[in-house]
Image (cartoon, helix red, strand yellow):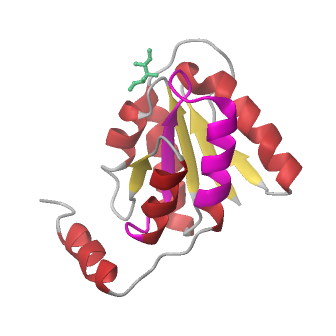
Amino acid sequence: MIIIGSDHGGYQMKEAVKLFLKEEGIEFDDVGTYSDESCDYPDIAKNVALKVAKSGQKGILICGSGIGMSISANKVNGVRCALCHDAYTAEYARRHNDANIIAFGGRTTGLEIAKQMVKIFLSTDFDGGRHKRRIDKIASMEGL
Ligand code: RB5
């Protein structure tokens, strides 16, 4: 189960990504927003981030640029939200950073790239090893 959310800047992209997830047979929980009407990205990022942190599932966050969503989601303990732009960043967000949320921009990313990134992000494992030590150091900064 993938937790997905966007603000108005990412709404059209979220709807397109949902169609792709359906085609791929991947279930999702859409926490909003549910229209093009203006809303505040931290509200959506918080809802997705809390569900991801609690459930251990992965999440997808989309705003205009992906920046506001990634900044916001990373405030929640246990969340590692990666702002991705291409197949490489999506792959290494998983392999090296064990990211549990992918963020990208609905206004900056083409749909085919977005679909490619989502597929890679959801199917790539964490490499572990030396990267685990670095992830633990990130966790040690929570609450500073
Ligand atoms: C909304 O206009 C826009 O600021 C938001 O979608 C996002 O890009 C912020 O980082």
**Dividing the picture into quarters, in which one does residue 106 lie?**
top right
Q: Which residues are magenta?
A: 96-121
Position of residue 44 relative to residue 59, above or below, is above
Query: What is the x, y in percent for residue 101?
Result: 49, 54
Q: Nearer the viewer, residue 83 or 59?
A: 83
Residue at the far front: name it: 88
**Residue 133 shows up from this direction:** yes
Query: What is the x, y in percent for residue 18?
Result: 76, 40
Query: What is the x, y in percent for residue 6?
Result: 57, 32
Task: Give the mark count.
Answer: 0
Name the quarter where the N terminus is drawn: bottom right
Which of the four quarters of the rendered structure image does ligand 1 lie in? top left
Query: What is the x, y in percent for residue 78?
Result: 37, 65
- For residue 62, side relative to residue 89 (left or right): right
Residue at the far bottom: name it: 129
- For residue 68, side relative to residue 94 (left or right): left
Position of residue 40 relative to residue 85, above or below, is above
Residue shown at the point (88%, 48%) measured from the top left: 23
